[in-house]
Amino acid sequence: MNEPVVLKGFGKGIAVILDSSCDFEIICDHFKQKVINGKNFFSGYEIPIQFIGRKLNSYELQKLIEIMKTFGGVHDIIFPWDEISFHNLLSTAGESAEDIKEEQLNAKIHKGTLRSGQVITSESDLIIIGDVNPGAEVISKNNIIVLGALRGIAHAGISGNKNAVVFALEMDPVQIRIANIIARAPDEDNKHEKGVAEIAYIENETIVIKPVTQF
């Protein structure tokens, strides 16, 4: 990952992507600068926030919260997910903590929106920092994480891994495939509230899509 800290908006909240291999003090310095630069955006309201990319202990989490409150003018912070890191999100999908840590270090990360005709593939986890537009396709042997809107095609677990998941801050795909199981876009009546992060996974040989708070 080129940057120690990347911020990505979702709905009325913010995902903070942290480099798992970077020294925490460097993380803090970069996070502080980004909060200062975006103070007008952060200031004065309750904000849902999600830290992704590395497992934070209680001290580290509190340190980042203090930075937001001190330098960003944030009054209250909400953690919309029961699990507060990408590490924990994937561990609930059936992977061991040790495996996830290694996979995080080897995850393929693409920054930027994917447009029609573009295809991104990964031999490990695939993280897209941006949108996947209609006509674009993302393919991974393991998990797919879209820190943006998924409006194209996603195929996770292409080697047959039925424990793989597809996560998106906005889930509106043309098609999702996990291992050999396919799900198409839900009808308008069955779509969840826009701006709610969702996760797709296999349950009873069927792909289920739920808000991540219900996962």
Image: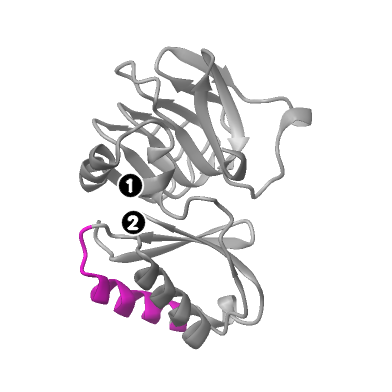
Vertical placement of residue 94 versus 102, above or below: above
- Read off the magenta span: 21-36
Q: Is residue 116 visible?
A: no
Image quarter of residue 158: top left
Residue displayed at 23% across by 30% down: 123
What distance separates the C-alpha of mark 2 from that of mark 1? Answer: 21 Å
Q: Secondary structure at mark 1?
A: strand
Checking the image for residue 119, the label placed there is: none
Q: Mark 2 against mark 1, which lies toward the viewer?
A: 2
Q: Earlier in the sequence, mark 2 or mark 1?
A: 2
Tell whether 98 sits left or right of 38: left
Residue to which mark 2 is pinned = 55
Q: Secondary structure at mark 2?
A: loop
Residue displayed at 49% across by 78% down: 68
Residue to which mark 1 is pinned = 110
Which residue is more in the foreground, 14 or 79? 79
Tally of numbered tags: 2
* Quadrant (top left, top right, bottom left, bottom right) of the C terminus: top right
Residue displayed at 33% across by 15% down: 160
Image coordinates for residue 6, horizontal then vertical, percent: 38, 63
Q: Is residue 24 magenta?
A: yes
Vertical placement of residue 142 versus 28, above or below: above
Q: Judge the density around disc 1: few (<14), some (14-19), many (≥20) Cα neighbours within 10 Å.
A: some
Q: Is residue 34 magenta?
A: yes
Q: Residue furthest front?
A: 58
Identify residue type, mark 2. Lys
Tell whether 151 sits left or right of 195: left
